Image (cartoon, grey):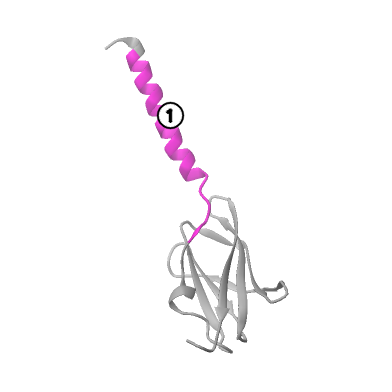
Amino acid sequence: MNQFSSIKRWHLLLVGLLFVFSAEVSAHAVVTESSLKQHPIEVNHPTEVSLHFNSGVELALSKVFLVSQGDVFHPLDIAKGKKPGQMLIKIPALEEGDYAIKYKVFAADGHLTEDVIRFKVSAQR
């Protein structure tokens, strides 16, 4: 094996390692599961919604809002769940209608993620 071949291998190894580590460093907190799918919100019944993220979330730096008709924002209380990356959101009793949960969370690595989860509250199930 010549010296050039050895340098080329090291170069490829370093590029590969940089790619792997940069993918992990640039990660954002993405919702991987929501309790809204399994347990829809009932009319006039306070509910706790669980969101699971693919990474840890800094709750002290995160905000969650209920968005109701007319784009009215109501801040919601959040708490850490029992599982890593789990956030619990307290939803007040709601009337029938279309709503959304808008969240702005900071992942444990410091990246900001904003998104909206839309849902419907309906008496008919």
Image coordinates of residue 24 in percent, x first then y, are: 46, 45
Tell whether position 27 is magenta: yes
Q: Along the line of sight, which residue is nearer the eye, 97 or 39?
A: 97
Which residue bears the numbered disc 1?
15
Picture residue at 37% right of the left edge, 28% below the top: 13
**Main secondary-structure element of the magenta-colored stretch:** helix
Tell whether position 111 is magenta: no
Q: Along the line of sight, which residue is nearer the eye, 53 or 42?
A: 42
106 in relation to 18, above or below: below
Compared across the picture, whether 88 is left or right of 72 comes to: left
Q: Can you name the residue that lies furthest to the front here? A: 124
Query: Residue 94 appears in which quarter of the rendering?
Result: bottom right
Label 1 SS: helix
Number of numbered discs visible in the structure rendering: 1
Image coordinates of residue 30 in percent, x first then y, are: 51, 57
Query: Residue 21 appears in which quarter of the rendering?
Result: top left
Compared across the picture, whether 80 is left or right of 97 comes to: left
Q: Which residues are magenta?
A: 5-31
Q: Can you name the residue that lies furthest to the top here? A: 2
Disc 1 residue crowd, few under 14, some 14–19, many 20+, Cα 10 Å: few
Image coordinates of residue 51 in percent, x first then y, are: 50, 68
Q: Along the line of sight, which residue is nearer the eye, 13 or 72?
A: 72
61 in relation to 41, above or below: above
Image coordinates of residue 20 in percent, x first then y, are: 42, 39
Name the amino acid type tagged 1: Val
Q: Quadrant of the N terminus?
A: top left
Q: Along the line of sight, which residue is nearer the eye, 119 or 73?
A: 119
Picture residue at 40% right of the left edge, 22% below the top: 11
Picture residue at 41% right of the left edge, 28% below the top: 14
7 in relation to 75, above or below: above
